[in-house]
Amino acid sequence: MEDKISREPRDLGRALCIITGASKGFGRTLALQLSCLLKPRSVLMLVARTTEQLNQLKEDIITLYGGQNQLDVCCVQADLEKKEGVEKTVQAAKETSVSEMDHLLLINNAGPLDTDMQLQARLSSGDLQLRRSFSLMFSEGQLLSCEESGAKLMKLLLDNDYQSGAHLDFYEL
């Protein structure tokens, strides 16, 4: 008798997913990737400093699925370097409809990715040592693309075989 492997589509269930720095770069990539892995009635909270880019991302997600994914996509304009921005984000999370959620995902994104922000740091940072360090990472091909890093994170989340709160290194996955 043959063993048949179930090939059911994998998803992250119903979740409240908060992504900081969502307006561009890695945060934007993650928002688009996660939007297709969340079950209907999930909440995708996009947090960044720029309202216009957040609203554009929300529209892109809605357009991508034609509203068929039934996500509650909400935008929170907040500067998380300031106490008021953190409080505004926490309050927005408390106001979401999170009953019967399977997961809470908080993605506070930062890292050595090849983004516009990384380019700006390489070219115009006032810290010469930082500029040199980022330029060296770029020239040696040590910067990851947002899509590559996001794909690894999606696989990690879907496999669900990591300890909550554990430190995970991209290069060890």
Image (cartoon, rainbow, N blue to C red):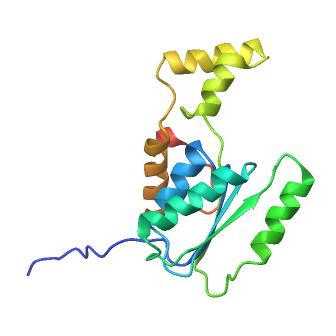
The relative height of residue 25 versus residue 105 in the rendered view (above or below) is above
Residue 12 percent across, percent down from the top left: 49, 71
Q: Residue at x 74, y 20 (%)?
A: 125
**98 left or right of 115 in image:** right
In the image as oriented, which residue stretches furthest toward the right? 83
Residue 123: image x %, image y %? 65, 17
Q: Position of residue 146 (x, y in %)?
A: 50, 42
For this orientation, the residue located farthest to the bottom is 100
Q: Would you place residue 170 above or below residue 114 in this image?
A: below
Figure check: 41 above or below 163:
below
Which of the 4 image quadrants contains residue 116?
top right
Q: Does residue 154 appear left or right of residue 53 in this picture? A: left
Residue 90 place in picture, x, y as percent: 81, 66
Total labels: the figure holds 0
Whether residue 42 can be seen here = yes
Report whether 46 appears left or right of 71. Answer: right
Q: Nearer the viewer, residue 54 or 29?
A: 54
Q: Nearer the viewer, residue 76 or 112?
A: 76
Which residue does the image show at 8% across and 81% down from the upper left?
1
Quarter occupied by residue 119? top right
- Answer whether residue 161 is visible to the viewer in this image: no
Q: Which residue occupies the foreground of this view, 112 or 33?
A: 33
